[in-house]
Amino acid sequence: MGNMIIDGQIVEFGEEKNILAVIRKAGIELPTFCYHSELSVYGACRMCMVEDKWGGTLTSCSTPPKDGMEVRTNTEKLKKHRKMILELLLANHDRDCTTCEKSGRCRLQEIALKVGVKQIRFGQEKKEIPVDDLGPSIVRNPNKCILCGDCVRACQEIQGVGVLDFAYRGSNLQVTTAFNKALHQVDCVNCGQCRVVCPTGALMIKKDIDRAYEALQDRNKRVIAQIAPAVRVAIGEEFGMEPGAITTGKIVAALRKLGFDQIFDTAVGADLTVIEEAEELMERIQNREQQAKKGKPQAQFPLFSSCCPAWFKYAEQKHPDLMGHVSSCRSPQQMFGVVIKEEFKKLYKNDDKENVVIAIMPCTAKKFEAARPENSNNGIRDVDMVITTQELAIMIQQSGIVFGELEDEALDMPFGFTSGAGVIFGVSGGVSEAVLRYYFKEKNAATLQNISYSGVRGMEGVKEASVEIDGRNVRIGVVHGLKNAESLIKKIEKGEERFDFVEVMACPGGCIGGAGQPIPQNSDVRKKRAKGIYKVDKASPIKRSEDNPAIEALYSGILISNREILHRHKHKK
Ligand code: HC1
Ligand code: SF4
């Protein structure tokens, strides 16, 4: 606690860890490239410099506040200094702003305008480094990189993957991968969190928009959409709405205007996952108990969730020994993709239109998941394309659809029903909560409330819950961020923690914080999106997956003798 004097004004501070936060609290928006409150402080871009009362300059992001400290944020010296930094950055930057996809959202462009850079006094040193667009999820264009290092820290500090780093020296300094390999040739998990923090167009989503338009215009194709849970509480941000605004009905209306023939909700796929995963978990617990009775105790590894494709790839790469403990369930996206294809084959057996499934996802790694060979049959994919929330927003804008004015429309049949359990998958803890709902057969509000208070909800990176099910104490772990997952795995391996089930989502807060979602993202935005998801659940007349009539119909229909299509290793048609 103390007081600082900022530009002559007294400003009280408390828990703020640096003067930048106190300055922002005073309502002054200092420009920064390399500062993110959720990443470590790097202090490299020097844009947040302030002047102390003796005329010395200090970086506000790396200086803690002190009682009585006096700083100025906008002196002539500082203004000159910021302009110089920007001119140097721009001299070394590929400035094709008119055609750059990031134009209008680029922090370099925005700050250059704000600071008033009107000319660049240095000759342009044009880099011509090859663009890496070979992977399924992320395009990396080093010519647009300003060396802020945000991506390096996101990959290391959120995911613990660390495939990006600085290389070379002096004017050749670059952010790159080991041996300059393409992202898909290194251990990148396609999570896209590097792209979330990148201030320029150096890291972008690999777009599938043109392929989607092509399919929509093809009369020989029936184009079917499935909308992921987290998209509905975020896309509105692209159209001036608050994070968390629930826009399911508007998304359906927009997709119809774009020419989609049938529109469904991935929450139906999540309902299938709940049932399959809950049964798999109970089978494992019972099996372990029987083995123990026979005096053959089994290793105490938990069952890990499998629906996050970035986590799944990470586990394959880093923990091949644990793969037997990762659920055999395919993700809701893939379960629903294969179910739609099977159902439509039956429904439209007399026409020869090709069924094309496009998944609308908050996630860049879902593009990778849909393209995995085991998710295809004879070269035909179960999910043909994945469009992120941001790509859908672009398509809506390009088509002149006024999103905010759309009247809500309903999903199509035969999968027009969803459950709250399926929708809460979009937030960290949601998979566990939905699975727990399946175990508790009492259908009253108190049971649901007890489950929600068990410890699975909230934005903490690691959560734990102990729940009594049929006289057993079932231990659940919930993590988001692969770095958190790695720490938990280490503790489990050492026997310091014991769980029956561990839910892992790679992105902060779960899918609501996916890299395909609108930017900016921070903990406030994610909290509001999570609130939106829980509101959808609250308003949903069906709370449990098994009560969804669409699910009942599937289990007594195409899945009656074909349930194995919902599982990874058994998915052979
Ligand atoms: Fe997710 Fe999932 S919740 S992984 O975050 O299990 O992407 O939203 O669609 O598949 O349902 C993402 C979200 C999504 C799957 C479901
Ligand atoms: Fe790292 Fe994820 Fe970016 Fe890949 S997509 S480089 S894993 S942050």
Image (cartoon, rainbow, N blue to C red):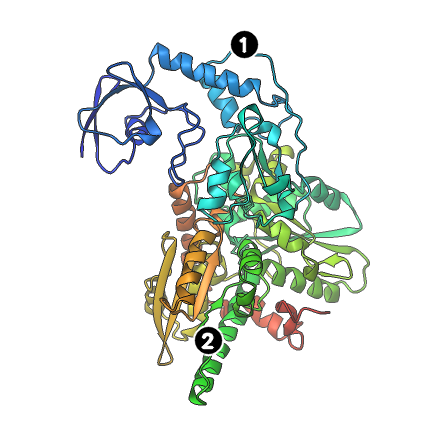
Horizontal and vertical percent for residue 137? 62, 45
> Foreground: 460 or 262?
460
Whole-angstrom CA distance, mark 2 to mark 1, is 66 Å
> Where does label 1 land, which residue?
121
**Residue in the image at 77% along x and 55% along y:** 354
> Where does label 2 land, which residue?
299
The quarter of the displayed image where residue 42 is located:
top left
Whether residues under marks 2 and 1 lie with C-beta atoms below 8 angstroms apart, the answer is no
Q: Earlier in the sequence, mark 2 or mark 1?
A: 1
> Foreground: 548 or 406?
548
When the figure is inspected, residue 510 is found, relative to residue 562, above or below; the finding is above
Three-letter code, disc 1: Arg
> Foreground: 319 or 21?
319
Query: Is residue 221 something one can see in this rendering?
Result: yes
Horizontal and vertical percent for residue 265? 57, 56
Q: Quadrant of the N terminus?
A: top left
Three-letter code, disc 2: Ala
Q: Quadrant of the C terminus?
A: bottom right
- Classify 10 Å Cα crowding around label 2: few (below 14), some (14-19), many (20 and above): few
- Classify 10 Å Cα crowding around label 1: few (below 14), some (14-19), many (20 and above): few
Left/right of residue 312 with respect to residue 14 in the rendered view: right
> Foreground: 547 or 562?
562
Which quarter of the frame holds ligand 2?
top right
Horizontal and vertical percent for residue 458? 36, 54
Horizontal and vertical percent for residue 165? 53, 39
The residue lying furthest to the bottom in this view is 294
Query: Is residue 481 something one can see in this rendering?
Result: no
Left/right of residue 143 with respect to residue 236 in the rendered view: right
**Residue in the image at 63% along x and 51% along y:** 368
- What is the secondary structure assignment of the residue under circle 1? loop
